Structures are given as C-alpha cells and as structure tokens.
Image (cartoon, rainbow, N blue to C red):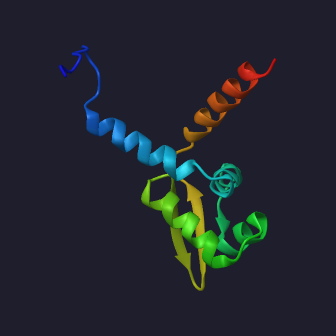
Amino acid sequence: MQELKIKNRPPREAFAERARVIKALAHPSRLLIVDELSRGERCVCELTELVGHDISTVSKHLSLLRQSGIVADEKRGLQVFYRLTTPCVLNFFACIESVIRAGKP
C-alpha cells in the first residue's frame, strides 16, 4: 500500500509520542490528579486522600504521569511533592469538554 504524502505532517513517531501522553491521561484517577495539580503543588499524602486509593496505587499513577512529562516531583524530607509541568494540558481538558457537549442532544 502506498503511503499518502501530505505536506507538513509530523513523522509517525510524533503520533506514537502523542498517544503515549494521551494514554498517561486516560484514567479517571490521573485526570483527577492533574486537575488538582492545576491548583498548585500537592504532596503524595494529599493526592492519596483526594483519589481515595492506597498510596501504592496513587504512586503508580504519579509515576506514569511523571514519565510522560506531565508532572514533576520534588522530595522534601520524607514528603514528595508533585506539580504540573505542562499547564497546557488543561487546554486538552477544555477540548474534551467541548467534544462531550457537542455529542449531547
């Protein structure tokens, strides 16, 4: 099959990277965490209480978000604090809300 050539289209690898970031966001708990971090940095204990899961589960969610570049962490004493590194992800949230509204009768 011949590949369609479109001028200025990003390389295929760029689409794989985009999918990786979208997958990192594709969980209700991670969306809740990102939403909360849009209000300022939080320690793991605060996020654990917010999400309502054990610290191990929340830490796994945070690790996935960190690996995708959405959040950053900083250890201070015994606490680890997280902050949103890419506030533009909130634009993505707004886009999702537009899609949801457009799909409703």
**Percent from the top left, x then y, of residue 28?**
68, 52
In this view, the residue in front, 69 or 42, is 69
In this view, the residue in front, 13 or 74, is 13
**Residue beneath the point at 74% across and 64% down:** 51
**Percent from the top left, x then y, of residue 80?**
58, 75
- Image quadrant where one finds the N terminus: top left
Query: Taking the image as drawn, is residue 3 in sight?
Result: yes
Mark count:
0
**Percent from the top left, x then y, of residue 98?**
69, 24
**Residue beneath the point at 24% across and 16% down:** 4
Query: Taking the image as drawn, is residue 85 in sight?
Result: no
Q: Residue furthest front?
A: 1
**Percent from the top left, x then y, of residue 72?**
50, 61
**Residue beneath the point at 62% across and 53% down:** 27
Q: Is residue 33 above or below residue 22?
A: below
- Image quadrant where one finds the C terminus: top right
Q: Is residue 47 above or below residue 79?
A: above
